Image: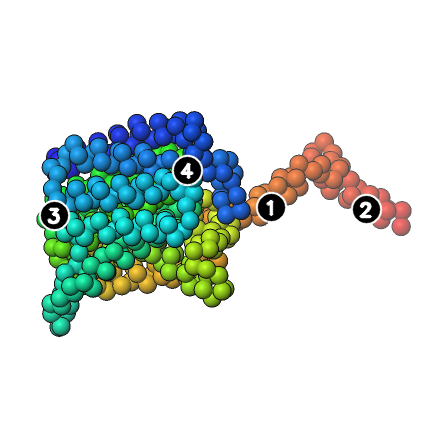
């Protein structure tokens, strides 16, 4: 536990120190993300957040974890994905070349023992996967790289979701007794937390492709690492739930673009975060909603680990119900403050009218010395009777 705490704190400190450095360098070198049709931000933002996260992460890990074969594989593979992302951030890169770089970075892991050799299914038992397991690993890592990359469209969204996912995978690794995996995920949680201090709306810097692809790569690779120890259905379902939002958003984007006859790599403004903004939510509100959905997915994964399948299923159903409403732009946040104002307004109006009525001058009334209001009326009546 002491080692975990040191790693987590170091990761946060390095991230807090190096992120401002990345901001200064990005402005000096002109590595900026400018506003555009699909961009939400209104001013140019530095896009070298990936550099701060990459360096901070590996500093924290290398100072606290002894190197082994799989860590070396992660270091080499993540270096490739980081370089591909930086080239895209600085000069731009054709989607096909970027995909090729992602595949190479994932394939590097094969030579360091990252593969799913078998899986154990209920009733059926153990199934040997052989080459299929290796292909699955490459597709899985590349898929998560692109899922996180696609979700990086709003201040603090991708980094916050990866922070939640890293914490959940840290719990999973610690649960199965894998110390190295636990430290790696805790370091990733630390750097994303420190980066969020600068990336949450209004952000001072964004991840860029180098940052989002690095985060997706690390989460994908470490989740495969976990399958090496417990290759069960649950070990497959756990990372799927933890990264539910990016994966669903990516699947939704592919289906949406195919139905419209567009290329699946064509960018658009139909992602979940865009649809939340279209319903009138602010950036902060939209991000917090998606944080909540991610947290529910993560809690469902943990509950399933302990055998609470019914409760986990309820949480997943709630999440999917929220996501469907977001997809159809029907999601609304209940503003209790606004409702209170709506209820209070008529009451204030009534009180205003009442006060105005009380402040009006009363009709003049005649009074005699005794203070009676009706004596003059009675006297006039008596005089009329006497005349008659």
Residue occupying image coordinates x 35% and y 34%? 197
Q: Are marks 2 and 1 in contact (CB under 8 Å)?
A: no
Distance in Å between CA atoms under marks 4 and 2: 103 Å
Assign a secondary structure to mark 2: helix
Residue toward you, 343 or 8? 8
Assign a secondary structure to mark 3: loop
Assign a secondary structure to mark 4: helix
Quadrant of the frame with the N terminus: top left
For mark 1, what is the residue?
A: 350
Q: Are marks 1 and 3 in contact (CB under 8 Å)?
A: no
Horizontal side, residue 209 vs residue 344: left or right: left
Task: Report the number of numbered marks.
Answer: 4
Residue toward you, 212 or 272? 212
Q: Is residue 129 visible?
A: yes
Q: Is residue 104 above or below residue 1?
A: below
Q: Which mark is residue 299?
A: none
Q: Which mark is residue 178?
A: 3
For mark 4, what is the residue?
A: 90
Alpha-carbon neighbours of circle 1 within 10 Å: few (<14), some, or many (≥20)?
Answer: few
Q: Which tag is nearer the camera, tag 2 or tag 1?
A: 1
Distance in Å between CA atoms under marks 2 and 1: 42 Å
Q: Are marks 4 and 3 in contact (CB under 8 Å)?
A: no
Image location of residue 335, percent across then percent down: 46, 48
Residue occupying image coordinates x 13% and y 72%? 124
Assign a secondary structure to mark 1: helix
Q: Is residue 13 above or below residue 262?
A: above
Image location of residue 75, percent across then percent down: 21, 41
Q: Which tag is nearer the camera, tag 2 or tag 3?
A: 3
For mark 2, what is the residue?
A: 381
Distance in Å between CA atoms under marks 2 and 3: 107 Å
Q: Are marks 4 and 2 in contact (CB under 8 Å)?
A: no
Residue occupying image coordinates x 33% and y 52%? 100
């Amino acid at each position: 536990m002491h080692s975990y705490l040191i790693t987590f704190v170091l990761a946060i400190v390095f991230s807090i120190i190096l992120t401002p450095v990345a901001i200064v360098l990005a402005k000096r070198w002109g590595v900026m993300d400018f506003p555009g049709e699909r961009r939400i931000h209104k001013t140019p933002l530095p896009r070298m957040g990936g550099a701060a996260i990459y360096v901070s992460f590996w500093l924290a890990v290398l100072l606290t974890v002894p190197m082994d074969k799989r860590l070396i594989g992660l270091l080499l593979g993540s270096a490739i994905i980081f370089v591909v992302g930086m080239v895209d951030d600085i000069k731009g890169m054709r989607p096909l070349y970027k995909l090729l770089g992602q595949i190479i970075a994932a394939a590097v892991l094969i030579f360091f023992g990252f593969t799913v050799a078998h899986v154990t299914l209920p009733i059926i038992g153990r199934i040997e996967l052989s080459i299929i397991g290796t292909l699955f690993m490459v597709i899985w890592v590349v898929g998560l790289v692109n899922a996180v990359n696609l979700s990086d469209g709003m201040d603090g969204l991708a980094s916050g979701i990866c922070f939640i996912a890293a914490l959940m995978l840290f719990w999973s690794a610690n649960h199965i007794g894998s110390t190295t995996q636990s430290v790696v995920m805790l370091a990733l949680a630390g750097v994303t937390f420190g980066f969020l201090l600068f990336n949450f709306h209004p952000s001072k810097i964004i991840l860029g492709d180098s940052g989002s692809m690095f985060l997706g790569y690390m989460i994908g690779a470490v989740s495969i690492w976990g399958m090496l120890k417990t290759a069960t259905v649950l070990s497959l379902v756990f990372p799927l739930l933890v990264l539910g939002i990016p994966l669903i958003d990516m699947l939704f984007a592919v289906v949406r673009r195919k139905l419209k006859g567009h290329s699946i790599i064509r960018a658009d403004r139909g992602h979940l975060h865009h649809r939340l903004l279209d319903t009138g939510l602010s950036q902060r509100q939209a991000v917090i909603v998606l944080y909540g959905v991610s947290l529910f997915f993560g809690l469902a994964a943990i509950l399933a680990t302990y055998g609470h399948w019914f409760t986990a299923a309820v949480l997943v159903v709630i999440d999917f119900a929220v996501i469907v409403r977001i997809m159809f732009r029907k999601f609304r946040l209940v503003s209790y403050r606004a409702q209170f104002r709506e209820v209070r307004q008529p009451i204030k109006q009534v009180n205003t009218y009442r006060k105005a009525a009380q402040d009006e001058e009363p009709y003049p009334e005649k009074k005699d010395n005794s203070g009676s209001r009706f004596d003059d009326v009675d006297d006039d009546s008596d005089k009329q009777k006497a005349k008659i």
